[in-house]
Amino acid sequence: MLKRRLAEGIGLQPVEGDVLEDGIVAAPLFGFESKLAEGKPGEIERRVLEAEGVQLADFKVKAYAELSTKGARKKALLVPEDLRLLEIAEDDYYPGKRKARIGFRLTKGNYATTVLMELMKAEGNTND
């Protein structure tokens, strides 16, 4: 979804038709009760579903109700709270390399691996 927004030139800035949470674009976690956005954001959401060959009704599994999902929305922008550099030291596992130990807090429903993946591909990271 975010890749499509970037390709369409709207990125993560709220535009007319977006669904917002605390002023931040909220991306759909599709389900059978999902309410799609309006305008350009809604067009993108519909195209994603179409490209995947999925309809909202597909998220309701009558034979196995526990597999059904109503859907929700999640902020498209993850901002770690209380981000801090705790230590830079020699790496125990990779001699001659250095390691950084960081700390941060995330709100419910967000994952540290998401933050770490973005940090690892940040500009200036030589990965060696």
Image (cartoon, rainbow, N blue to C red):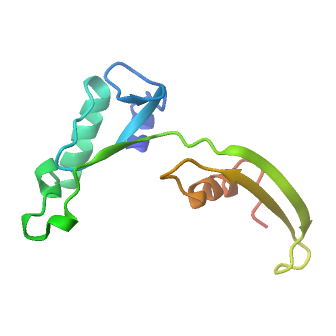
Q: What residue is rendered at 13% in x and 56% in y? A: 58
Relative to residue 96, is residue 18 drawn left or right? left
- Where is residue 81? Give x, y as percent: 67, 43
Residue 10 appears in which quarter of the rendering?
top left
Residue 47 appears in which quarter of the rendering?
top left
Residue 93 appears in which quarter of the rendering?
bottom right
- Give the quarter of the figure containing the N terminus: top left
- Where is residue 126? Give x, y as percent: 77, 59
Relative to residue 8, is residue 24 drawn left or right? right
- Give the quarter of the figure containing the C terminus: bottom right
Relative to residue 15, is residue 78 drawn left or right? right
Viewer-closest of 106 and 27: 106
What is the count of numbered marks? Answer: 0
- Where is residue 115? Give x, y as percent: 62, 53
Q: What residue is rendered at 82% in x and 61% in y? A: 100
Q: Is residue 3 above or below residue 113?
A: above
Q: Is residue 79 above or below residue 67?
A: above
* Residue lying farthest to the top in this orientation: 16
* Residue lying farthest to the left in this orientation: 62
Q: What residue is rendered at 22% in x and 47% in y? A: 49
Q: What residue is rendered at 87% in x and 71% in y? A: 97
Viewer-closest of 67 and 11: 67
